[in-house]
Image: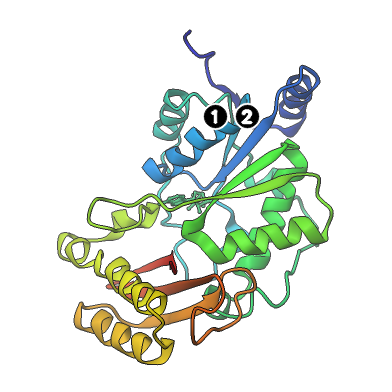
Amino acid sequence: MPHAPLLRFTDVVPLRTEVAGWRRAGARVVLVPTMGALHAGHLALMARARALGQRVVASVFVNPTQFGPHEDFSRYPRDTETDLALLAEAGVDAAYLPEVSGMYPEHFSTRIEVEGLTEGLCGAFRPGHFSGVATVVTKLLNRVQPDLALFGEKDFQQLLVIRRAVRDLDLPVEIQGVPTLRETDGLALSSRNRYLDADERARAPRLHAVLSRIAEGLAAGGNAVPLLAEGHAALTAAGFGPVQYLEVRDAETLAPLERATRPARVLAAAYLGRTRLIDNVPVG
Ligand code: AMP
């Protein structure tokens, strides 16, 4: 059966009316928040959403409050028409494209801070980032009112921050993570990969290779300290720099770990030329 055409919403009231109708009819509604510039990793989330619910809403919003003053907000890739075509092809029911002025009206003054989890890793290098993320995701959840929302493990710290905010604030929604989709050479798909030139693109898969090597060493009972030192050296040799962090953390609390005595994750952020890449892998 051909799928119904993609609905497109900019305003929250008609979107809510549509979603409320779906829910009254017994449908499980799944939200997939994105910043657009969609790639196959996003589409894997859409496919998972279709498998888990009867109705799928994808939001496309480049959220200004999660970018620092020297980050890439103004040059972040935007291609709404291509995004809408991809969402239609993926069988998404509704695209939600809010405007910045509607999300952040004059005198907007509330922000959500998730303490602890946001202190290290990306939080240490992107002040205000996770507060911007937690605030916009809370708004999107309140606006769309889905039963379930999906987030990629690619942004592992973000996934944990959102889970915690939803739990702490009693938001009536389930959060699920989706494993990272990678190119065949291991590079995690990302909208920012299009910033890489040919030489950088050839080096970029080393990040995943280094993370995997550390994860294997830990799974074999190794100690993180020498594994991380070796990993740092390998990244530098591959042309990455600065390496902002390369760490082994508890997969639930993000507490630092020296050995994988609990479920663990190896996470990194590193520049390759002007492009900041992040990635992470599970241990075991
Ligand atoms: P973004 O548009 O970068 O904000 O990403 C939107 C959602 O897609 C987030 O939940 C990301 O974690 C997820 N995502 C991005 N890249 C990937 C990938 N390679 N595999 C799986 N999920 C991804």
| Residue that carries the numbered disc 1 in the rendered image | 50
Q: Which residue is drawn at 79% across and 25% down?
A: 20
Q: Are marks 1 and 2 in contact (CB under 8 Å)?
A: yes
Residue flagged by tag 2: what amino acid is it? Gly
- Residue 273 versus residue 165: which sits nearer the camera? 165
Q: Indicate the position of residue 73 as horizontal and vertical percent values.
A: 49, 59
Spatial CA distance of label 1 from label 2 is 5 Å
For label 1, count other residues whose C-alpha is less than 10 Å away and answer few (under 14), some (14-19) or many (20+): many
Q: Indicate the position of residue 63 as horizontal and vertical percent values.
A: 59, 54
> Relative to 157, is 272 on the left or the right?
left
**Disc 2 residue lies near ligand 1 with CB under 8 A:** no
Q: Indicate the position of residue 229 as horizontal and vertical percent values.
A: 34, 90
Q: Quadrant of the C terminus?
A: bottom left
> Relative to 201, is 157 on the left or the right?
right
Q: Which residue is drawn at 42% across and 86% down?
A: 224
Badge number at residue 53: 2
Figure quadrant of residue 118: bottom right
SS label for mark 1: helix
Q: Indicate the position of residue 242 as horizontal and vertical percent values.
A: 34, 83
- Residue 217 versus residue 84: which sits nearer the camera? 217
SS label for mark 2: loop
For label 2, count other residues whose C-alpha is less than 10 Å away and answer few (under 14), some (14-19) or many (20+): some
User: 76 above or below 237?
Assistant: above
